[in-house]
Structure formats: C-alpha cells, structure tokens
Amino acid sequence: MQATIDIKQVSLTYETNDGSVNALSDICLTIGRGEFVSLIGPSGCGKTTLLRTIADLETPTSGDIRVNGMTPSEARKKRSYGYVFQAPALYPWRTVGGNISLPLEIMGITKQERKKRIAAGLEMVGLSGFEGKFPWALSGGMQQRASIARALSFDPDILLMDEPFGALDEIVRDKLNEQLLRLWDRTLKTVVFVTHSIPEAVFLSTKIVVMSPRPGRIHDVIECNFPRDRSLEIRETAEFLAIANRVRRGLREGHGYD
Ligand code: ADP
Ligand code: MG
C-alpha cells in the first residue's frame, strides 16, 4: 500500500517557563492510503501533539514527516487535511449549513457549489435537513457529526480526529462509530483517530498505535484485519477480545504510575 503519511524519527520538545517537556520521542510510523489508524494512550502521552504535528499545527524538533510525498506545510496548503477537534467547535452564530460553508467560503467556492457540497456533507453524516438549525439546537452527537461534515466539506484525503466522541455516552458513541466506519468505507479517506477507548480503537482501526508517556513514544503497533464493512457484533469475537487484551497489556506496560 502506498504510504500517505510517513513519520520518521520525529521528536518534539515544548519549551515552557517551567523547563522543557518532551512530548514526542523518536516516533516512526507509516500510514498507508485508506488506512484507519488509532492512537491510544494515557493522558499526556502526546496523542494530540502527534496529530497536530501531522497537520502542520506544530513543528517537530527533529525528524521528518511526509504527507503524500510533501511536507506537512505543503500538504496543508493543498488542503489534504480535515481536522475534527475534541469539542465540536462550531460557531454558535452560524447555522449548521453556515458552519460547513465557512471553509468553502474561504476557498472562494461559489454559492451554488457550496449548497451542493453542504447537502452532500450532511447526507454523509446522516444530518440531511438540519442545515438551517443552529448548533445549540442539536445534541452533542449531532454537533460532532456536523463538525465531521465541515471537516469533509473540501474533500480532504486525510481526516484527523482528536477524541471526537470522547464526551458522548456509549450508546451514541457506538452509533457514531458505525456511521464513521461506513463513511470511511465509502469515501476511502485515510483516517488518524485519537481515542482513550480500547473497544472504540479495536472496532474502528486497521492499525492501533499504543503510546506511552514521558516522553511520548510508540509502545506497540497492532494490525487489525476485520472486514471494512464490519458491524458492532465483531466485538464479541475471540479475535476482537485478543486484540483488545493486547492493547490493554500495552497500555499497562507503558504506564509509569508516577
Ligand atoms: P495527549 O493528547 O496524549 O493527552 P498532548 O499531546 O496534549 O497529550 O500533550 C503531551 C505533553 O505535552 C503533555 O505533557 C502536555 O502537558 C505537553 N504539552 C502539550 N501542548 C503543550 C504546549 N503547547 N506547551 C507546552 N507543553 C505542552
Ligand atoms: Mg489530547
């Protein structure tokens, strides 16, 4: 599989008033086109930093990242990334349609084309008919789906998602996991997904990256070979439980308890 994201020996140190923080240390990771890769690890292990580094929102202190053969900065200018934040981050004074429209307006896309893309985006996340609603009138799960539609509005190759469903209850999360998987299957996007949840990581991923803190590094990389059109029932299979146990073991081994 052709590499979409190639991360070589990336380290990142934040300089702060209290000294330096080693957020990432010697990260090597290859993500193929169309993969769904989850980053899992305890709070503070550098998951967000790694995602932001791929997205050109942080610059590594050393090492190299290539995205479709380009630097992250070139890839960002080519609009390769859609980014979904932990909180929905929708503008409250804009309708759902207006929020999805914003990146398209910045790109100078015509009103007629915007309308088409907004409708397609909302259809993709199961929110058809909601374009005129304001974010506060929607549930948390619906807001996060609107954020996903916004991230997809300019059809990026790569979808970067930072704990998008972390604040939602389990039933809603299950539904959104299934929906995201269908979206991934249909659009063939490459997804990098940060989560705290072991079942979520195992259910969604083609590859799980287990990280450990201080300094943030990769502890284990686990391949998952479930069919692309899997359903939630796979969570009861022996294969699923074996992978979940390996992730759990990795998290325990990598954890310092200090
Ligand atoms: P995670 O997303 O896994 O919880 P982060 O990537 O947010 O971890 O943070 C990794 C480490 O870097 C933590 O120790 C955090 O406090 C520190 N950190 C994150 N962002 C900054 C920043 N802008 N300045 C200084 N330290 C930071
Ligand atoms: Mg984080």
Image (tube, rainbow, N blue to C red):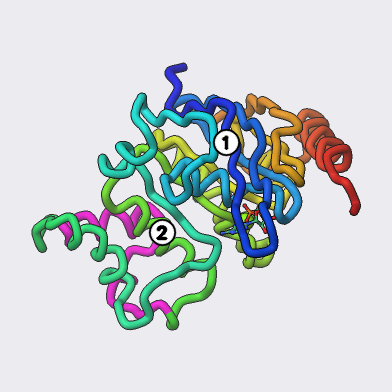
- Between 97 and 209, the residue placed more toward the observer is 209
Q: Does any portion of residue 50 appear in the rendered image?
A: yes
Residue 219 shown left or right of residue 9 in the figure: right
In the rendering, at what x and y percent does residue 71 appear? 37, 33
| Rendered view: 124 above or below 211 | below
Camera-near label (2 vs 1) is: 1
When asked about the image quadrant of residue 96, the answer is bottom left
Q: Which residue is mark 1?
A: 37
80, 13: nearer the viewer: 13
Tell me how many marks there are. Answer: 2
Residue stretch rendered in magenta on the structure: 114-135
- Local SS, label 1: strand
- Quadrant where the C terminus sits is bottom right
Q: Position of residue 209 (x, y in %)?
A: 67, 35
Q: Are marks 2 and 1 in contact (CB under 8 Å)?
A: no
Decide: is 92 above or below 181.
below
Kindly identify the amino acid type of the residue bearing the numbered disc 1: Val
- Between 33 and 69, the one lying in front of the other is 69
Task: Tell me the residue at 42%/28% (across/down).
Answer: 66
**Disc 2 to disc 1, how far (Cα)?**
23 Å
Position of 151 with respect to 108 (left or right) is right
